[in-house]
Image (spheres, rainbow, N blue to C red):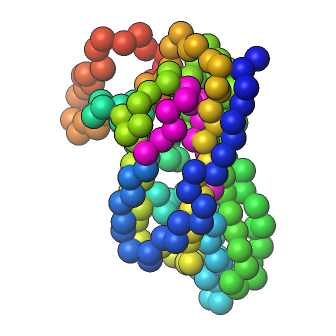
Amino acid sequence: MPQILHTVMEPDQNLAATAEQFTYDLPVNPLSAIIVTLRALNNSATVANFKQGADDLMSKITKARTRYRGATVFDGDPIDLAQVYGAYSAWYPSQGQVNITDNDVRSVSFPLLFGRRAYDPRECFPASSRGDLVLEIETAADPTGLDGFDMQIETVELLDATPERFLKLTTTQDTMESGDVNDISLPRGNKLLGIL
C-alpha cells in the first residue's frame, strides 16, 4: 500500500454570485482523487425557494476539467461526473446539514477520481511536472434558494504509486434528429470502460 498524502489544496475559495472560472496547478505526485466541497447558505426566507438536493448545491459548478499539457483527462458537468464515479467506486456525493432554516450552512462533497477506486496505486494519474496537470472549474450564478458559496479543494496523492493506467472521461454533445436513427461518434484511441 502506498503512502497517502491527503491535503487541502485550496481552502475556502469565496465564489461570486455570478459566473467565474478558476485554474489550479495540481500536485506533482501520483494523484488518486480530487475532493471538491461546496458550502452555501440557505436563502430560504421564502419557503418556496428551499431546495434540499445535493444536485442543487452542485449546480453552482457547471464544468470540472483537468488537463495534462493541454490534453483533457476529464471534462464534464460535476453531476454527470458524480454519477460515473459513483457507479465505478460507490463513492457518491455526501451532503451535510439539510434543513430549511434561513442562512444555515449547507455543504456537499464529491470526488473527481483518476481510477475506478480511490487509493488504488495501480489506477491513478502518474507523477507529473509542476504546471503540467491543472484543474479548471467553471461556476454559474447562484441557484435559487442558496447564496454565499465557498469552495474547498482537497487532493489525495499516492506517494509510492507506479500506476498502470488512469481514467479519462470526456463529454460529447450531439443534436439528436427527431424520429430518426442517430449516430454518435465515440472517442478513438482509448479502450472504452463505459458510456453514460
Q: Which of 7 and 165 is in front in this view?
A: 7
| Percent position of residue 147, x then y | 55, 78
Query: Residue at horizontal 36%, vertical 60%?
Result: 21
Is the magenta region chiefly helix, strand or loop? strand
167, above or below 79, in the image: above
| Percent position of residue 57, x then y | 58, 62
178, above or below 149, in the image: above
| Whether residue 187 is visible | yes
Residue at the far front in the pictured view: 130
| Percent position of residue 28, x then y | 50, 33
Q: Tell me where the magenta segment starts and ends, as one range.
A: 25-37
172, above or below 191, in the image: below
The image quadrant of residue 69 is top left
Tally the marks.
Answer: 0
Query: Was residue 28 drawn as part of the magenta stretch in this picture?
Result: yes
Residue at the far bottom in the pictured view: 45
Q: Nearer the viewer, residue 191 or 4?
A: 4
| Percent position of residue 56, x then y | 57, 62
Query: Residue at horizontal 64%, vertical 83%?
Result: 44
Query: Was residue 159 drawn as part of the magenta stretch in this picture?
Result: no
The image quadrant of residue 130 is top left
182, above or below 171, in the image: above
Query: Residue at horizontal 72%, vertical 31%?
Result: 4
Query: Residue at horizontal 58%, vertical 13%?
Result: 162
In the displayed structure image, the side of residue 1 where residue 192 appears, left or right: left
| Whether residue 47 is visible | no
The image quadrant of residue 170 is top left
The N terminus lies in quadrant: top right
In the displayed structure image, the side of residue 176 where residue 114 appears, left or right: right
